[in-house]
Amino acid sequence: MRCLVIEDDPGYRRLLRQHVVTAVEGAEVVEYVPAKAGRLAPEFTAAGFDVVIADSRPAGEDGLEWLTEWRTRPLFPPVILVLPEGDVALEAEAAARGAFGTLAKQPRIDPRRLAGLLSDAERHRRAEMQTFRLSPAAATAYRFGNIVIKGERCIRPLATSAMSTVYLAESEREGRLVCLKVLRQVPDNTEKGTTFDRFLQEYEIIASLRHPNVVQIYDLGVADDHAYIAMEYFPEGDLRSRIKRGLQPAEALHVLRQMAEALGAIHDVGVLHRDLKPGNVMLRRDGTIALIDFGLAKQLELDAEITATGEIFGTPYYMSPEQGHGREVDVRSDLYSLGVIFWEMLTGKKPYLAPTPMAVIYKHSHAPIPELPEGLQATYGPVAAGLLAKDPRDRFQTAGEALRALARLPGTAGS
């Protein structure tokens, strides 16, 4: 059994967890804190759970209204609502709105009542899911283009490139919304297939990382000869939109520090990012950022970034001089891209602009490093120069060195 507990009080969450795992051997309990995470995303159906136990006042709001809305979502599991003790009218209203059962919120939970509710809910859920699996809807629910990925419910496409399509999906295994990247390339024994295998190996390395500023990888596999990657979903969007709204210098430094720490983590395990740009810096609700799209994804998608007509899709703006000219790159190339983003965060503009991709690449190699606006250059110019030096030997040599330079800036210690 998988149980989703929606409750703000940490003590009561622990109490519910203890009773659930005692009542049902092997039960898995996932906790959701509405005061911190807000309402369940409208696309989320909790289809990977057998039962939901929810407080009647989540985040101080009306839990009956939440319940009513949940019951409109297809495949939403049975809901046990936790109500104030002795409120008979509220109990009747909860039943009328579709609650599978109710519990009185008191220091001691009636273990027999809870065990009976859980057993009944699990039986109901199994019958409901069996009916669904035999329905026509089940044939399309797990289809992503040409392939079927069991346990991942397709919601909608988010983005498409020459190499892959990214979907918003609900992972029944993870019990959460995920970004599901499905790669179009089929593994084979050619040289291109070898690059593909190396790409998957790099993502396996990233999946093993547990760093707050690196995207969480939940699953990596192959279905119908197509690889897929299930990763963290970022409803807050990416750094591009944040730059458009404008960033204060302190905010830009906060983001820069997190990016540098993430680069340090991936560099330490032997992975280069190769495609660092604001569109690959994702925002979380709590103000932290996470880097996405690493390593050989850059090599596999490069042809798609610059079209035959010379239109710029974004990447040339952030390429290091050595990368733009096809020379060997190392960690210092990622640091150059970091410097371009830092300059853009401070000014709202890219440091080098030109009408064609090759003209932008030329400027990265030959144009002087532009000065920051008055009031910013004296404080932040040295850090920008340490990241944007044309010759890699003149840049910061590691992410750690860049972080030490950031720590010396006025007003940034301990931030």
Image (tube, rainbow, N blue to C red):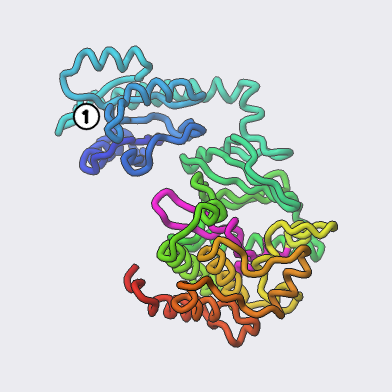
Percent position (x, y) of residue 59? 30, 35
Residue 69: quadrant of the picture? top left
Inspect the magenta stretch and tell me whether residue 245 lies in it: no
Q: In which quadrant is the N terminus drawn?
A: top left
Front residue (pair 206, 60): 60
Occupied quadrant, residue 19: top left
Foreground of the two, 316 or 51: 316
Q: Is residue 411 left or right of residue 368?
A: left
Where does label 1 land, which residue? Answer: 111
Name the amino acid, label 1: Pro
- Left or right of 136: which side holds 19? left
Location of residue 350 (image quadrant)? bottom right
Is 118 positioned to the left or the right of 219 in the image?
left
In this view, the residue farthest toward the right is 308
On the image, the x and y values in percent for residue 408 come to 38, 79
Up/down of 127 relative to 22, above or below:
above
Residue drawn at the location 48% of the way across and 63% of the way down:
209
Q: Nearer the viewer, residue 371 or 411?
A: 371
Mark 1 neighbour density, 10 Å: few (under 14) some (14–19) many (20 or more)? few
Q: Residue at x 27, y 12 (%)?
A: 92
Q: Is residue 314 above or below residue 169?
A: below
Residue 344, image x and y in percent? 56, 64
> Which image quarter holds the C terminus?
bottom left
Magenta range is 272-299
107 shown above or below 415: above
